[in-house]
Every structure is written in C-alpha cells, then in structure tokens.
Image (cartoon, rainbow, N blue to C red):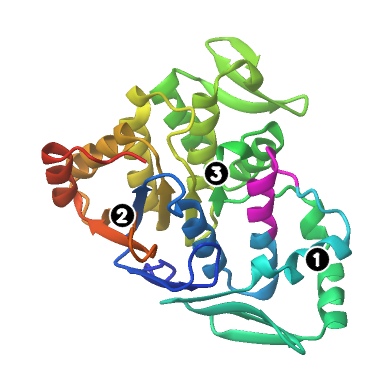
Amino acid sequence: MSEHFIREIEIKNYKLFQDFKAEGFGRVNLIGGKNNVGKTAFMEACVLAVAKNTKQLYYNILVIDTIRNTPNIFIKKSTPDEGLNDLLDNKNDFELMSNLGKSFISKGNTFAICTQNVEVEMNIDALSNFIKSNIGLQLKYAFSNVLLSSHMIADDFLKVIIGELKLRKKYSLLNQYLSEIFAIDLVDIINDKVYIQVDDEFKPLSNYGMGVKSFINIIAALLFPKENANIFIDEIENGIHYTNLDKLWEIILTVSKDQNVQVFATTHSKECIESYNRVQRKLDESDTYYFEMIKNIKTEKVFMRKLDSHQLEYELTHKGEFRG
C-alpha cells in the first residue's frame, strides 16, 4: 500500500516558497531545474511533511540543518539551548499541507507544532523541557534513511546502517547489488572501520572514490527501512560516473517497488535525466515521473511541470533542454 506516499503538497513560508503547490507525485520522482530554483528547499519541505510526530519533526529539522551546514553526519549541536534556538529561529516557521495532513511551526504567546494534523501547543519552558528530554537525538549518529546527501558519506553512517542490514537479513542484497556494478565481493566492518573485499583482499573504503561510496549509501538506505518509508536524495548524480547511472536507476526503481518506498531525487545533470528516462521505459514504469522546477521571470514564483516517461522522452529527443 502507498498511503505514506506524498501525492501533493502545498508549501507556505519555507525558504523561497511563500505559496507553492505541486501534485501528481509517484513512487519515484526526479526533480530537475536550474540552479537556485529551489530543488533542495522543496526536498527539505517534503522531509518535514513526512514527520509523524513532534519528536520526528524535531529530528528531521536537525538532520536538515546538519546536511545543510556540515560535511559529515554528526549533529553538531550538543546542548538543549542550542536546539531550542534552532526551533525559535524565524527560518523554521512554515506551513505545509499535503495528502498526509497539515504540518506547521508557528510562534505566538505559545509555540505551536503540528505534524500531520496533530497539533501540540507549548510555552517556552515546556518546549525547552521537550528538547532536553530528546537530547539523545542530538548525540546519536544523525544518519537518516529519509534525507541523503553526498555530505553524509562517512564510515560512521555506514557502520550503523550495515549493522542494521545484517540484523534485518538484507545485508546480502547490498553486497549482491555492489558486486553487479563494481565487482565487489563484500562490504563489511572490520576493527570498527568499513572495508571492501575484492577477491581475497580487503581495503579500507577510504581508498575508493565517491562513486562506490554513493552507491553504498543509496542502496543501503533503500534496503534499510523496516516498513513503508519516504527517501529523499539530493543531487543524486554526485560522484557517480555517467556509465553507472542506468544501473543505479534500475536498482532504485526495482528496490523501491519491492520495499514500497517512495523516492524523491534532485539532479543537475542531463545525463542523469536521460538515464532515468531510459530505465523508466526499459522497465515500463508507470508510477515514476520527472518534475521540472521553473521560476516565472515576471512573478518570480516557482512552479513544477510534470512529465511521464513518454513525455520526457519526447522532450529529451526533440528539445534537449534539460540540465540544472
């Protein structure tokens, strides 16, 4: 079932979106458009919209802040006061309406937090106590199967997620997909570090390039969820050679269907869009779409244009204008 999928969303007062609406999202959605049009901000808003409760919303805000500001996966804020200041900052006022429900943060005499139609009001003292009681979220690894970025590729992320895949009996699938692309026999944790085995030789993951790390990151996140999930991948093509893009999309489209996972991804690359479309058509996928984000020059409002696989193929072959 796909009740957890975002099918439509309205975004108010988040980053550059004052009053933005989009609809028609499928199981896999690739978002393109020019630089600074708002692709990453759109993804962040969706990450907040899928939060089911106040604790998850707070966690997702911290994850977004970490990915946006630091090139690693640790939450840098180590005190409740710093977490409180984050939520009190004007940048975190927003209102979202989707098929999943209404979510918002607003400040007045009390602090109102709503996640998927469930609203909680707290004064500053109550909010501070809430953050202190959830300080563990800040001290744990801020890895997330929700929002992925090339900044998140690190041993600490992979150590946690590989361990979980072993417990969930999905570890062999990770190695199977990696062997099909890179002739890698195994990725594993040895002496608290991530190693890759090729033939009978083990080498540290740090010896390998961004492409291998990105594949491990994405595949592991797709396999990781215990149940229905939404995954957001920013700048999916980063570090991946264009010759491997078709295989990446085959894995994403196949595993997302098997795992009942909704995927949103952004790209700046025409090669990535072309690859996505080839795989769409090869697998005859009907619930996968391309969305182009466009800013109206006169009004400066941003809107989305939806294309199915056939429409995208036509645009690519007749216009060839798609590049971030």
Image location (x, y in percent) of residue 315:
16, 45
In the rendered image, the quadrant that contains the N terminus is bottom left
Please tell me how crowded label 2 is: few (under 14), some (14-19), or many (20+) other residues with Cα within 10 Å: many
As measured in the structure, the alpha-carbon distance from the residue carrying label 3 to the one carrying label 2 is 35 Å
Q: Which residue is mark 1?
A: 85
Marks 3 and 2 close (CB-CB < 8 Å): no
Q: Which mark is residue 296?
A: none
Q: Amino acid at mark 3?
A: Lys
Query: Is residue 56 at all visible to an observer of this figure?
Result: no
The quarter holding residue 273 reads: top left
Q: Name which of mark 2 and mark 1 comes first in the sequence.
A: 1
CA gap between label 1 and label 3 equals: 40 Å
Please report whichever mark, 1 or 3, sits nearer to the chain's N-terminal start.
Answer: 1
Report the front residue among 74 and 194: 74
- The disc placed on residue 291 is 2
At x 30%, y 32%, the residue is 271
At mark 3, the secondary structure is: loop
Judged from the image, the secondary structure of the residue bearing numbered disc 1 is helix
At label 3, counting other C-alpha atoms closer than 10 Å, the crowd grade (few under 14, some 14-19, many 20 or more) is few
Q: Overall secondary structure of the magenta stretch?
A: helix
Q: Percent from the top left, x then y, of residue 97?
A: 46, 78
Quarter-of-image position of residue 124: bottom right
Q: Check disc 2 and give the amino acid type.
A: Phe
Say whether residue 95 is magenta: no
Residue sitting nearer the eye, 105 or 221: 105
Report which residue position mark 3 lands on.
169
Q: Which residues are magenta?
A: 62-74
Expressed as whole percent of the image width and height from the top left, the position of residue 56 reads 65, 67
